[in-house]
């Protein structure tokens, strides 16, 4: 049995990881300061053996008694709407939080896995994006707080790997969706589902011609597990390659929900990437990974979740 610390464990992706490792027979310590994470995401885990929750901010000094085999650093607000609400917390958790988590990994002799992001590529000039692309990031724009925090986190991770021989992994996560996202999270998929289910018009930013490639959370979790079990220290993209425009995504969600809502256009936020699609050939070669869940299937499961969330909020 491995003993695994997951920072941001009550967030969207973190909560899925906690459940997966528990199901695989590992002991899980979930750490979260609940800034954007929610206890609701892990309420089914509290009664389980080998699960501990620590309410702690990973950007402060962290202490975890006992041994650790792995640390998965998933703590960070990650929605573009969080970039304006929590800019300093995002920079702190990417920089100070990553430093603390790496220090803990070094002390415990644990493998460290960093949740990085396709945002490292910024508004990319190449499409699809391979891991070898260095990116096109505006460091002082509103997205810069997240992009640069994660780029710094990658640099810090590689420094600990090279200078202290810590066993490290870096996953670059592309747009991921599924149950446990907050309906008010601000990202496109939760926003469109919540709006469609409440009978409000869907707010498409710009003309909606910008593209994204959306990956269902179970596929991401499988990729993360395989990466952790590998010995590959350089960044690996994990995402779906079915690229679509944001307008097409909104239309698909309208169709799926059977909503009579319309689509309204709003200003495109600054530095919003025009295209995004991962090159996943490295994940295929190194991890034998490729996505299994089609957008149709994933969006259908996600709809059932948001129906519950929206009716819970409406009481
Ligand atoms: N978007 C939109 N309407 C919304 C929220 C987002 O049109 O209510 C757009 C956003 O401008 C971006 C895309 O959808 O082009 C994906 O945004 P998201 O916030 O999900 O994540 P991003 O990929 O930008 O980090």
Image (cartoon, grey):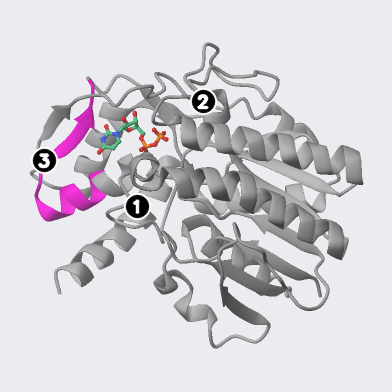
The residue beneath circle 1 is: 300
Q: CA distance from mark 1 to mark 2?
A: 22 Å
- Residue found at x 74% / y 47%: 227
Can residue 156 be seen by looking at this rendering? yes
Q: Which residues are magenta?
A: 192-206
Direction from residue 141 to residue 149 in the image, left or right:
right
- Asked if residue 67 lies in the magenta stretch, the reply is no
On the image, the x and y values in percent for residue 99 come to 70, 50
On the image, the x and y values in percent for residue 275 come to 43, 20
Depth order, front residue of 279/299: 279
Q: CA distance from mark 3 to mark 2?
A: 27 Å
Q: On the image, which quarter does residue 183 sit in? A: bottom left
Check the picture and name the quadrant holding the C terminus: bottom left
Depth order, front residue of 9/137: 137
Mark 2 element type: loop
The number of numbered badges drawn on the structure is 3
Tell me which label, 3 or 2, sits earlier in the chain: 3
Q: CA distance from mark 3 to mark 1?
A: 20 Å
Circle on res. 179: none
On the image, the x and y values in percent for residue 172 come to 62, 37
Tell me which label, 3 or 1, sits earlier in the chain: 3
Which tag is nearer the camera, tag 1 or tag 2? Answer: 2
- Residue found at x 29% / y 59%: 306
The residue beneath circle 3 is: 201
């Amino acid at each position: 049995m491995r003993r695994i610390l997951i920072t941001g464990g009550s967030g969207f992706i973190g909560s899925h990881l906690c459940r997966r490792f528990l199901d695989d027979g590992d002991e899980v310590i979930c750490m979260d300061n609940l800034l954007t994470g929610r206890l609701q995401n892990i309420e089914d885990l509290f009664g389980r053996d080998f699960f501990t929750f620590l309410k702690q901010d990973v950007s402060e000094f962290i202490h975890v008694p006992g041994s650790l085999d792995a640390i998965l650093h998933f703590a960070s607000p990650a929605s573009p709407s969080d970039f304006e609400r929590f800019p300093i917390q995002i920079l702190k958790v990417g920089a100070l939080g990553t430093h603390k988590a790496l220090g803990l990994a070094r002390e415990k002799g644990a493998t460290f896995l960093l949740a990085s992001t396709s945002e490292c590529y910024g508004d990319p000039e190449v499409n699809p994006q391979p891991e070898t692309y260095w990116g096109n990031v505006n460091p002082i724009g509103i997205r810069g707080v997240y992009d640069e925090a994660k780029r710094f986190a990658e640099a810090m991770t590689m420094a600990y790997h090279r200078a202290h021989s810590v066993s490290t992994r870096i996953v670059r996560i592309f747009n991921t969706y599924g149950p446990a996202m907050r309906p008010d999270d601000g990202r496109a998929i939760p926003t469109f589902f919540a709006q469609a289910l409440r009978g409000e018009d869907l707010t498409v930013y710009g003309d909606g011609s910008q593209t994204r490639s959306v990956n269902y959370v179970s596929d991401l979790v499988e990729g993360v597990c395989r990466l952790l079990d590998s010995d590959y220290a350089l960044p690996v993209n994990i995402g779906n390659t079915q690229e679509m425009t944001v307008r097409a995504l909104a239309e698909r969600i309208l169709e799926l929900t059977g909503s009579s809502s319309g689509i309204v256009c709003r200003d495109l936020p600054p530095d919003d990437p025009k295209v995004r699609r991962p090159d996943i050939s490295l994940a295929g070669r190194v991890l034998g990974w490729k996505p299994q869940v089609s957008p149709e299937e994933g969006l259908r499961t996600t709809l059932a979740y948001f129906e519950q969330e929206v009716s819970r909020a409406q009481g």
